[in-house]
Amino acid sequence: LVMTDANDMGPITAPLNELLTETKLQLDRLRAENRELQIQSRITSAEKHQTEAIIFSISDAVIVTNRFDELILANDAAEKLLDFKLETSQRKNIDRVITDGTLVRLIRDTRNHAHNAHRKVIEHCIDYHGVLRTFTITLSCVLTTNHEVSGVVAVLHDVTREKEISQVKTDFVSNVSHELKTPLASIKAYVEMLIDGEVEAESSKQEFYEIIASEADRLHRLIENILNISRIESGVVKVVREPISLTA
């Protein structure tokens, strides 16, 4: 029987111990990386659910496409406006889902020309059940960490009512300007005749004075009505509605 000295085993056990130690360290690193990946996956999943919840809570129509122009997300407002169902349209090319060719072109152009601008706002009219409605469409590119385009987000805000109100206000200002000029023109004309001495008879002068006073009152009423509209809009004047007799 030959007894082996422990010192003689050194050249064999030392590299083995080093290999086992390095293997253990690698396993520990892999376990740590795996735990980190699991955490990141949970965070990503939570962020995805949060993003979807935000999109579905928005009253404006929202459409999200990927780099292949495929529909990946849309809220209820978009489904109603563009007449499709997400559950049957997901991962389909937008030209097979959206019938409005202009909107399809805008989404594709935004993705193709992302290097020029990451966000743009365009006004566009869409036929909604036979009624033409005006929308401001905000198109934004979704970029990866490498600044590559991964998709496009389109938000459609209905501004039909705002456009109508704007037109009403424009017409109102135009009409008011005309109404204000009429009494002013009369006052100016009669005052000029009095200043120039074209009227000598006291009866005629009295008639002119009465006309000037009447037109001044008319002008005052117009200005008061305009101010009342402004007061009502700002909430300073409380409008009290009550029934009245039209006959009386």
Image: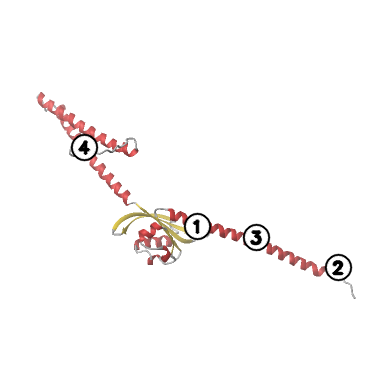
Q: Which residue: 31% across, 38% down? A: 232
**N-terminal label among 2 and 3:** 2
Instruction: Kindly report which numbered mark, 3 or 4, lies closer to the viewer in this rendering.
Output: 3
Amino acid type indicated by mark 3: Ala
Badge 1 crowding class, 10 Å Cα cut-off, few under 14, some 14 to 19, many 20 or more, is few
Looking at the image, is mark 2 or mark 4 nearer the viewer?
2
Of 12 and 184, nearer the camera is: 12
Q: Position of residue 231 (x, y in %)?
A: 32, 36
Image quadrant containing the C terminus: top left
Residue drawn at x 18%, y 29% as measured from the top left: 213
Q: Earlier in the sequence, mark 4 or mark 1?
A: 1
Disc 2/disc 1 C-alpha distance (Å): 62 Å
Q: Is residue 149 left or right of residue 121?
A: right
For marks 2 and 1 on the same chain, the one whose residue lies earlier in the sequence: 2
| C-alpha gap between disc 4 and disc 1 | 61 Å
Amino acid at pointer 4: Lys
View extreme (bottom): residue:
1
- Distance from Cα at disc 2 to Cα at disc 3: 37 Å
CA–CA distance in space, label 3 to label 1: 26 Å
Q: Is residue 225 visible?
A: yes
> Which residue is tagged 4?
181
Please name the residue shown 80% across and 68% down the image: 13
In percent of width and height, residue 127 lies at 31, 59
111 left or right of 19 in image: left
Disc 2 designates what residue?
6
Q: Disc 2 vs disc 4: Cβ atoms closer than 8 Å? A: no
Disc 4 element: helix
Circle 1 residue: 49
